[in-house]
């Protein structure tokens, strides 16, 4: 159905929007650009002295460089105030370099358009330069040659998580398992402490892995990353504590397990990986050791088990206070072997070949003894994904308690639909974004109810909510926090888009300027 509106009516609508004190939203700007392409608004030549502004920048700041320092000039301050500048501060406060000492950062009133201010300041003869305060971020994709094969890291959104943090050697993670091959290139110099606990008493040792299991687990948590070798680990930098309590056949005693847990926690492990299990309910001795670790600030994360049974029948999965991990395949399905039940807190990629040949595409590729790499599957492989993210979280927010770490991981995981309950699937980026203690980088939520679509986007604390109802207007609400106790909210309703053409029956009257009506159809 065509909606007839005149060009003057359309112009007046946008004139009214321009009268608002707040800057038009991106949707409004897009609409104006659409009108400009029709020739309704006059075009303006670009200031050739101003560089094209592209890329993200701080929304209320501009960087200037004086030709001669006029920061104390009352007259020049008035000129800045007229553009919405509320303060200026020297960038290089202690520099004696004459060139660097002329750089200042200008703070703008809320809602002032940075690009417009830069354009105006570029015309000032008193200034040498005017430009935005651009934002930089880590280039977080690693260069390890086998990284593209690690589908699990993509599934839990590690690339975005690495923008927030890549780990630190100050964070210690314990692998209580079959040992770790410390001579592997991926672990060179990264094992800070190792002990053999198989006898029930931990003794200083290299804790070399004479199996394969512990080395594979450790690689997922923290293989050396962005080093151009092998695989990528979740933590690019980390320190391992290795407690060897399982033999080459992958078995060990309860006293060996308890000794390993206490040894790791006493020596500063912030997270313990227990990719192991026994077919019994949690014993008092096991629970006491776990309680000791948790009370000592250590998060204990354990495998649910590989028996396709209820995890409540296994230990340490049935112990109180631990975080229990189930396994998923490449399509977020429950792995056919994964234990399940209400005590399983969270799921993570563990591989699911389901009878097919095991490959990097359906299982987990990681490190193996002797400097090699191999694919494995199991809740033992799922658990180190969660441990790795927990360690990454603690590297950026070390003050979190074990219960807070557990809540952060579970509350920010992605809901998945599985045949039997194994919890939501781990999401590294959402976890770090919500719990790092830093301003959120970006979160986007889209909800559609009865044809009405609402999209909420948060970027570094600024929230924009856009609601679109078919056949009516699009409403955009932007909330910009100015300080911890105050919010400023602006709501702008902008007409929906139209495809418009001039009425061909409208002709020019002997060269006189006139407005021809537009015929418009909703997009």
Image (tube, rainbow, N blue to C red):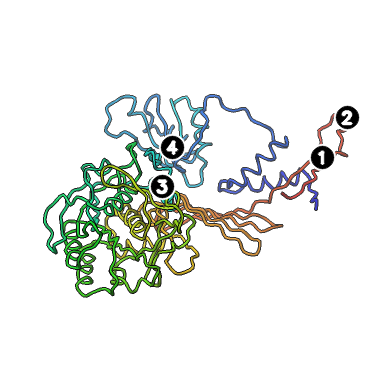
The residue identified by callout 3 is 150
Q: Earlier in the sequence, mark 3 or mark 4?
A: 4
Give the quadrant of residue 198. bottom left
Q: Earlier in the sequence, mark 4 or mark 1?
A: 4
The residue identified by callout 4 is 134
Q: Circle 1 sits in a helix, a strand or a loop, which is it?
A: loop
Q: Are marks 3 and 4 in contact (CB under 8 Å)?
A: no
Q: Is residue 482 visible?
A: no
Q: Which callout, 3 or 4, points to the residue nearer the camera?
A: 3
The residue identified by callout 2 is 510
Q: Circle 2 sits in a helix, a strand or a loop, which is it?
A: loop
Question: Where does residue 207 sit, x and y in percent of width and height?
Answer: 18, 52
Q: Which callout, 3 or 2, points to the residue nearer the camera?
A: 3
Label 4 to label 2, Cα distance in Å?
Answer: 52 Å
Q: Residues within 10 Å of mark 2 (few under 14, many from 20)?
A: few
- Residue at image x 62%, y 64%? 449
Question: Where does residue 510 sit, x and y in percent of width and height?
Answer: 88, 29
Q: Earlier in the sequence, mark 3 or mark 2?
A: 3
Question: Where does residue 148 sit, x and y in percent of width and height?
Answer: 43, 43
Q: Nearer the viewer, residue 490 or 521?
A: 521
Q: Which callout, 4 or 2, points to the residue nearer the camera?
A: 4
The residue identified by callout 1 is 516
Label 3 to label 4, Cα distance in Å?
Answer: 33 Å
Q: Residues within 10 Å of mark 4 (few under 14, many from 20)?
A: some
Q: Is residue 424 left or right of residue 205?
A: right
Q: Are marks 4 and 1 in contact (CB under 8 Å)?
A: no
């Amino acid at each position: 159905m065509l909606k007839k509106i005149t060009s003057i009516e359309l112009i007046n609508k946008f004139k009214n929007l321009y009268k608002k004190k707040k800057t038009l939203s991106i949707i409004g700007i897009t609409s104006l650009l659409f009108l400009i392409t029709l020739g309704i608004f006059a075009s303006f030549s670009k200031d050739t002295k101003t560089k094209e502004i592209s890329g993200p920048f701080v929304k209320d700041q501009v960087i200037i460089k004086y030709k001669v320092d006029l920061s104390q000039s009352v007259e020049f301050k008035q000129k800045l105030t007229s553009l919405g500048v509320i303060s200026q501060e020297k960038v290089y406060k202690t520099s004696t370099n004459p060139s660097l000492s002329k750089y200042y950062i200008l703070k703008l009133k809320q809602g002032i358009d940075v690009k417009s201010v830069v354009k105006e300041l570029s015309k000032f003869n008193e200034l040498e330069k005017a430009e935005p305060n651009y934002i930089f971020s880590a280039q977080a994709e690693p260069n390890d040659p086998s990284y593209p094969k690690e589908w699990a890291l993509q599934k839990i959104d590690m690339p975005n998580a690495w923008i927030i943090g890549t780990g630190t050697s100050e964070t210690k993670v314990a692998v209580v398992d079959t040992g770790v091959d410390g001579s592997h290139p991926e672990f060179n110099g990264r094992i800070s402490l190792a002990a053999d606990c198989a006898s029930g008493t931990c003794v200083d040792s290299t804790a070399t892995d004479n199996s394969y299991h512990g080395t594979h687990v450790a690689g997922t948590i923290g293989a050396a990353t962005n080093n151009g070798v092998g695989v990528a680990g979740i933590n690019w930098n980390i320190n391992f504590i290795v407690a060897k309590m399982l033999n080459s056949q992958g078995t060990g005693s309860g006293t060996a397990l308890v000794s390993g847990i206490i040894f790791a926690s006493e020596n500063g492990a912030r997270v313990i990986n227990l990719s192991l299990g026994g077919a019994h309910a949690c014993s008092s001795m096991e629970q006491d050791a776990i309680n000791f670790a948790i009370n000592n600030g250590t998060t204990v994360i354990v495998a649910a088990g590989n028996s396709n049974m209820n995890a409540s029948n296994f230990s340490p999965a049935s112990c109180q206070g631990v975080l229990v991990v189930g396994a998923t395949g490449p399509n977020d399905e429950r792995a056919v072997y994964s234990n399940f039940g209400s005590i399983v807190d969270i799921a993570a990629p563990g591989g699911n070949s389901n009878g097919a040949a095991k490959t990097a595409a359906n299982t987990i590729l990681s490190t193996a003894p002797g400097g090699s790499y191999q694919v494995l599957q199991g809740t033992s492989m799922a658990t180190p994904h969660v441990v790795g993210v927990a360690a990454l979280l603690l590297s950026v927010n070390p003050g979190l308690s074990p219960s807070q770490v557990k809540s952060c991981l579970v509350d920010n995981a992605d809901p998945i639909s599985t045949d039997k309950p194994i919890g939501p699937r781990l999401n590294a980026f959402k976890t770090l974004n919500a719990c790092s203690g830093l301003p959120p980088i970006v979160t986007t939520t889209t909800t559609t109810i009865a044809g009405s679509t609402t999209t909420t986007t948060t970027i570094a604390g600024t929230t924009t909510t856009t609601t679109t109802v078919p056949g009516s207007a699009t409403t955009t609400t932007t909330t910009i926090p100015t300080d911890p106790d105050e919010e400023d909210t602006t709501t702008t309703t902008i007409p929906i888009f139209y495809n418009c053409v001039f009425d061909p029956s409208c002709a020019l009257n002997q060269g006189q300027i006139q407005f021809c009506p537009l015929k418009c159809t909703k997009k």
